[in-house]
Amino acid sequence: MRYLPLTPDDRRVMLAKIGAPDIDALFRDVPREAVVPLSAFDLPETKGELEVDRALSKMAAKNVAAGAVPSFCGAGAYKHHVPSAVDHLIQRSEFLTAYTPYQPEIAQGTLQVLFEFQTQVALLTGMEVANASLYDGSTATAEAVLMAQRLTRRPKAILSGGLHPHYAETVETVANLSGTVIRTPVTPGAAEDIAALIDNDTACVVVQSPDVFGLIRSLRPIADAAHAKGALLIAVVTEAVSLGLLESPGAQGADIVACEGQSIGNGLNFGGPYVGLFAAREKFLRQMPGRLCGETVDASGKRGFVLTLSTREQHIRREKATSNICTNSGLCALAFTIHLSLLGEEGLARLARLNHARASALADRLACVGGVELVTPSFFNEFTLKLSKPAAPVVDALAAKGILGGVPASRLMPHEAKAQNLLIVAATETNTDDDFAAFETALKEVLA
Amino acid sequence: MSMNNQGRPSQPGVAQDNELPTISGDRGLDLEARLIFEIGRGGVTGVDLPDVKVDDTRLGGVRRKDAVGLPGLSEPEVIRHYVRLSRQNYAIDAGLYPLGSCTMKHNPRLNEKMARLPGFGDLHPLAPRSATQGALALISELMNWLTTLTGMPAVAMSPKAGAHGELCGLLAIRAAVEARGEKRGRILVPESAHGTNPATAAFAGFTVDEVPAKPNGHVDAAALKAKLGPDVAAIMLTNPNTCGLFEGEIVEIAKAVHAAGAYFYCDGANFNAIAGRVRPGDLGIDAMHINLHKTFSTPHGGGGPGAGPVVLSERLAAYAPLPLLVSDANGFRLIEDRDELPAGAKPFGRMCAFHGQMGMFVRALSYMLSHGRDGVRQASEDAVLSANYILASLKDVMSAPFGEGPCMHEALFDDTFLEGSGVTTLDFAKAMIDEGYHPMTMYFPLVVHGAMLIEPTESESKESLDRFIAVLRGLAEEAKAGKRERFDGAPRYAPRRRLDETAAARKPVLRWKPDPLPQAAE
């Protein structure tokens, strides 16, 4: 087996040194009834690289990659162009095959990246501090709600109807254990009166902008209403590129920001791994979940970086930790940081404007198709259309024509009567005018 | 010199304590990297994009007014910066990385290539069913490998790392307890457990009750049984345990746990010692997460991403979270809606958006197909053999609390051999850095004083193991002889000397901030 360096001779010599007659002797603590022969496993034997490559390539070929056809799927995961330098750099052995930086003297590469990452996330979200990443946007949102419950010692979390339903379900799964979660009704393309629901038991309001339909929501009035009642505003962002064109959640009064960072540096990967961005006001630092990297000096006075404030964390604090998270999303955070370093201020601003311009052009074009109505008056790079027919079969029919025509809202909210005909459509810098034309033509045919 | 926001000097490479200081601050191939915020500037970018104008009519009145504050860098500058940073990291590709419990084994590059096939890497999670059949087939095949290797009937694929898997398992247990109309709020956790175990139990709303270890490193089964009662929901036991020992009484423990109406959660972090030889399902386990980034070698990436699928027993299978993968005449399908559930399914909720760490699934299946069942078993045997070889080769100069052996895939030492030398476990570990090795896991498990937990994995040749053993013998002999030069102030030859962690925590600097503008002179 090509990955195993020990030879049969090595194994004999090593067993002799140990003083064991055979390998079985090393497993002597295992109850006899629990040891099974190899034949008990109905699985194939070793394969060479070529055979594995063939088998997996065959599976991959049965999928339709976003880049292979005109593709307009978003709803929490977005197709963007990732510069070649990003994937090259994250595959450097020293980044790819290192562990969590427990020995800072020989992990300064990872640690300095995390420090840069935390700075970028804080700048982008308009917050004072950010952690070294969580798993993804949805789990970051759940952690934010738990943090708000701890900070306010209040039970109730109010989730906006515009929050991605997968995120809402992720929050409910954990936050109902420590409190109560209330979801407001969905209002596709329109704001909701969430402020009226905030009471003295409310720990936090969770609002996504742009929301799951693509609508941009102004957070400031909600922040003011929450703060007036002693509650916190958690802002959720599923499309990180939008922060290049829209006012940051921090500037709009958010207390905690949970953001999906996939759009910057990371591929679609059928849903994971992604990277959760988590930022907050500095006064909430001690209740933050996850790793934090901090600047310090070494014994000779050189600047260096270490994991810090770990008394919040599971490996020190055990059952009193702020979260159980250990492994997070380090390499995806690295990809995010490299891509954002390449973009810089001007690149991010251009990318964000370009996304909005592409989506605007597509929205105008599709809104002219018979049986199509644009329901989101504001949007960044994703908007929602109301079709004359249920959207799910339309998407299937478009797929049959070689177009990935967006996400039917009913896939995310199957029981929502008003969502049945809604189609969530994203357009990014990767979509060409030819893609638009193909989409328009196919949609006309399907709706005819 | 610039200062950080706590008033400390903030500049790389300012001091050089030995040899002739260089003018640049770099030393040969030791190249320093400033922060991107210190290199970048306006007017430059590493990505060429058209400069389109957009109006505000569709921006909801919240168009950004201020700059983000990001630095501008060209592509060559970005590449140089991150290449320089990478060179300040130790990595398994560069040398033996014996972090016990973390399983730093070889990461095959084929797996990276497979995960980047456009059909996987560029596949949208909400693409129509017809566009994702190959991806769903891959997940199904991986599920078959995981359930077959563990002898368990079901597996939940969405947890994103080990601790997330623990949470998934405990939430399934909570749902099962509630479905029986019972209230059980206590979880038993051995004191040798990973910190994630008690943290997860608390996260899932349980109270934690610690079970002591016996002097021989095994969990005290009698104490554990004595703590069982009608309020105990589950035990969380790591097996092989964090002392590197197989809990031989596990079947007895499982029976007692089940007789008390509780569930058996196994922390599968150490499954790599027994994969292909022992099926956890045969031991009476109800739920176990599998760290694909440990046992099945998806790269650790400097702290993730991982993946933590959870295998479930018959008693818990019904409570697996959404989404569920099913197949019918039309192929594979994800069930994301409670109204479409198969008979008997009662999912406790959802762990995350979408369906789990697909990129890790591809790598793990690539690893499994490459190894085959025979290679998986051989890998486990070689990992155990190598750890025992290290234990046998070092126990005369270092102190091994359970040195009579055998151990499983990791060899545990304590600091008894350093007594009176003035050298601590930390000093010993830092001296290993100067010898070109990443230190072992230190001060864990907590049940052993000054613990040093060495996990060589199956990826080392005998020559590599012998060299490592020779270095550790040399260090141990010098420490015991009171020769402290190598230990005091180590490491000397790393990119940094020991870092001041106290200062970092006392006045935290967690991000770069621009220097305040100098005050204009009056």
Image: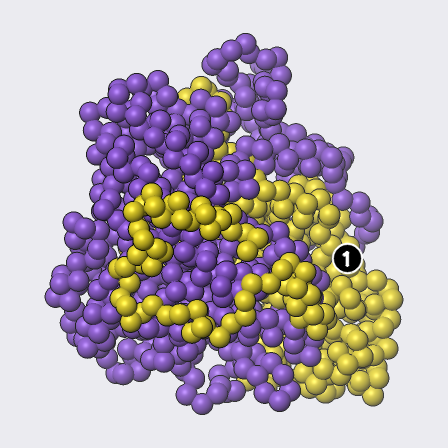
B262 displayed left or right of A264: left
Residue shown at 62%/66% (left/top)? A270
Q: Residues within 10 Å of mark 1 (few under 14, many from 20)?
A: many
Is residue A223 at all visible to an observer of this figure?
Answer: no
Q: Position of residue A292 (x, y in %)?
A: 45, 43
Q: Up-down: is B218 above or below B130?
A: above
Looking at this rendering, what residue extends furthest in the top direction? Answer: B20
The picture's colour for chain A is yellow
Q: Quadrant of residue B39?
A: top right
Residue shown at 63%/83% (left/top)? B331
Residue shown at 33%/80% (left/top)? B315
A31 displayed left or right of A199: left
Q: Chain of mark 1?
A: A
Q: Up-down: is A246 above or below B259?
A: above
What's the image's color scheme? by chain
- Judge by depth and name the residue closer to the eye, A96 or B350: A96
- Judge by depth and name the residue closer to the eye, A386 or A330: A330
Q: Position of residue B392 (x, y in %)?
A: 31, 42
A209 displayed left or right of A23: right
Q: Up-down: is B195 above or below B179?
A: above
Is residue B436 at all visible to an observer of this figure?
Answer: yes
Question: Which chain: purple?
Answer: B
- Under mark 1, the amino acid is Glu
| Residue under label 1 | A429
Tell me the quarter of the image containing the N terminus of chain A: bottom right
Q: Position of residue A4 (x, y in %)?
A: 51, 51
Q: Quadrant of residue B499?
A: top left
